[in-house]
Image (cartoon, rainbow, N blue to C red):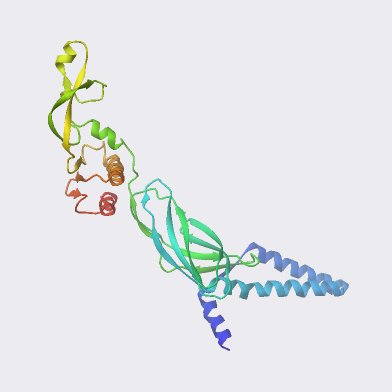
Amino acid sequence: MRSFRNFIRIRKRVTQRATIYSLLVVILLFGLFLEAYMHNFNLVYITLFFVFATAFSAGPFGILNIGQLEAGFSHTQRLYAGEDGNCLFRVSNLSTAPAWAITVHCDSYATQAMRIEAESSSLIALSISPQKRGRMHSDECWLQSFFPLSTVRFVLPVEKCCEAIIYPRPSGKPLSSFLSQQERPFGEERDFDGLSPYSGKESLSRIHWASVAKGEPAVKQFAHVMETKELVFDFYRSGRDDESRLSQLTLWVLECERTREAFRINMPHKVLKSNQESVDAILEYLALY
């Protein structure tokens, strides 16, 4: 009796939908019934009852396969507009038997886990491709399975759906290009430290004009006492429009994170400082701007 009550409880969690294979089974049963009725063949009767019993038992097996799973959104990697990323769902199997052919769906995205071990928990990565920056809220998430015969589609709703911040797509000029365009190199200078050949990329303010007059263009070199405490990025100078500016700033923020450079971003209504806020907090501000 306890097992039957447990099955009823599990059954209430799962939604069942017939598939095209259900219609094929019905047609097959009807054809076998006519064949058995008209010709009274024992073999046809045996086949008829075998097909009926197999199709009937698929329902309980499918319900027990998916109905004892618990699933919910876990976390995401950093997601950028226009790039592929992953939403991670934790799926726990409370049954003493493994679950088979489980598909995780979230809106129009889906991924399949062929086997979830008994009494275990797995992280399943759902690949998504967000197209716009900002907050992403999925409307509906669910688990789905056609196990064991594909005659019934079993659906188990997921209560906690995917929610994430989509950062601007990192693109634009690399950080090295930004540094080369500055009027002075990144660092504090001391006394004049000689000349070097002019490569065409240095600022005009660093050209040694006396060398130019002699026909041998050179640039002035200075020794660096210490690196500047932080880089300064300006929102309005980083691109032609808001989206290109946000993409450029995102790229520079990620490059500064990799090189561990301190930086400051002068936004229209706020100054973002890497020594006061985390990189994720700064990227979130850019994403929601």
Farthest-out residue, bottom: 1
Check the image and report above or below for 67 versus 174: below
Is 51 in front, or is 163? 163
The image shows residue 188 at horizontal and vertical percentages of 14, 36
Q: Is residue 66 left or right of residue 207?
A: right
The image shows residue 149 at horizontal and vertical percentages of 66, 66
Check the image and report above or below for 226 versus 32: above
The residue that appears at 31% across and 36% down in the rendered structure is 174
Is 157 in front, or is 116? 116
The image shows residue 48 at horizontal and vertical percentages of 78, 72
Farthest-out residue, left: 191
Which image quarter holds the N terminus? bottom right
Q: Is residue 15 left or right of residue 141?
A: right
Is 164 in front, or is 220? 220
* Count of marks placed on residues: 0
Q: In this view, does 221 lie to the left or right of 39?
A: left
Residue 247 figure quarter: top left
The residue that appears at 27% across and 46% down in the rendered structure is 260
The residue that appears at 53% across and 68% down in the rendered structure is 155
Residue 15 figure quarter: bottom right
| Residue 33 can be seen in this image | no
The image shows residue 148 at horizontal and vertical percentages of 64, 67
Check the image and report above or below for 153 versus 229: below
Check the image and report above or below for 237 versus 205: below
| Residue 53 can be seen in this image | yes
